[in-house]
Amino acid sequence: MTYQRLTREQMAARVARDIQEGAYVNLGIGLPTMVSNYLPKDREILLHSENGLLGMGPTPPKGEEDEDLINAGKQPVTLLDGGAYFHHGDSFAMMRGGHLDICVLGAFQVSANGDLANWHTGAPDAIPAVGGAMDLAIGAKQVLVMMEHQTKNGDSKIVPQCTYPLTGIGCVDRIYTDLAVLDVTAEGLVVHEMVAGLSFDELQAVTAVPLISDFQKKDA
């Protein structure tokens, strides 16, 4: 069968669909920041940034950027009506205190039991940049990971055990990749969705851990 991987924009739109009305959400540095551009306009969703913003809007149009209004990744953002600025310490208190409903994070690896590695590859020339990822991974009520399914070398980013330094242990709830949506459960990784044209066997062939199809789980 033939299939087409999701683009990064399509991945962001897919994640955005699952963010519910009234949610307080942190979008991690990198790929997850794109989610802000695809949030349903009929839902009130409050976006948080660890550098001290609540109520962020989408990326500003080119030429309309405000250099004093940026997210934690130093990208220009907008602020919705009613949005607020506050101290960095207050921002981390929100993250650590369980006040965020969802965080969306990128990842280098996610293990079968939901361990997350997203801040350092261990390479000698890599620059460690954990930022607030550890605080988000343990502080948010739900942790969603958004990443490509495989590395540029074709290796699975979903692994039996993370070989990179950990960000959090057993913290990931759902994984969104360019091939599938997978839930982390006590029984294992359950495939909730796959891209059109991709078979379960094909997905399993590029994933380094055993998978359970949602269809099989419902019939069990």
Image: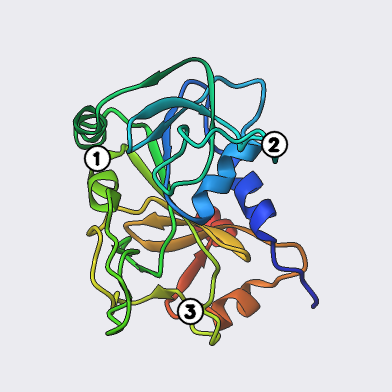
Q: Residue at x 44, y 58 (%)?
A: 106
Q: Nearer the viewer, residue 93 or 76?
A: 76
In this rendering, the label closer to the viewer, 3 or 2: 2
The spot of residue 72 in percent (x, y) is 39, 44
Between the residue at mark 1 and the residue at mark 3, the CA separation in whole angstroms equals 27 Å
Q: Which residue is mark 1?
A: 139
Q: Nearer the viewer, residue 90 or 187?
A: 90
- Counting residues from the start of the chain, the first of labels 3 and 2 encountered is 2
Q: Which residue is mark 2?
A: 61
Q: Which residue is mark 3?
A: 156
In this rendering, the label closer to the viewer, 2 or 1: 2
Secondary structure state at the residue bearing disc 2: loop
Answer with the quarter of the image where residue 63 lies. top right
- Counting residues from the start of the chain, the first of labels 1 and 3 encountered is 1
- Counting residues from the start of the chain, the first of labels 2 and 1 encountered is 2
Q: Residue at x 65, y 29 (%)?
A: 40
Secondary structure state at the residue bearing disc 1: helix
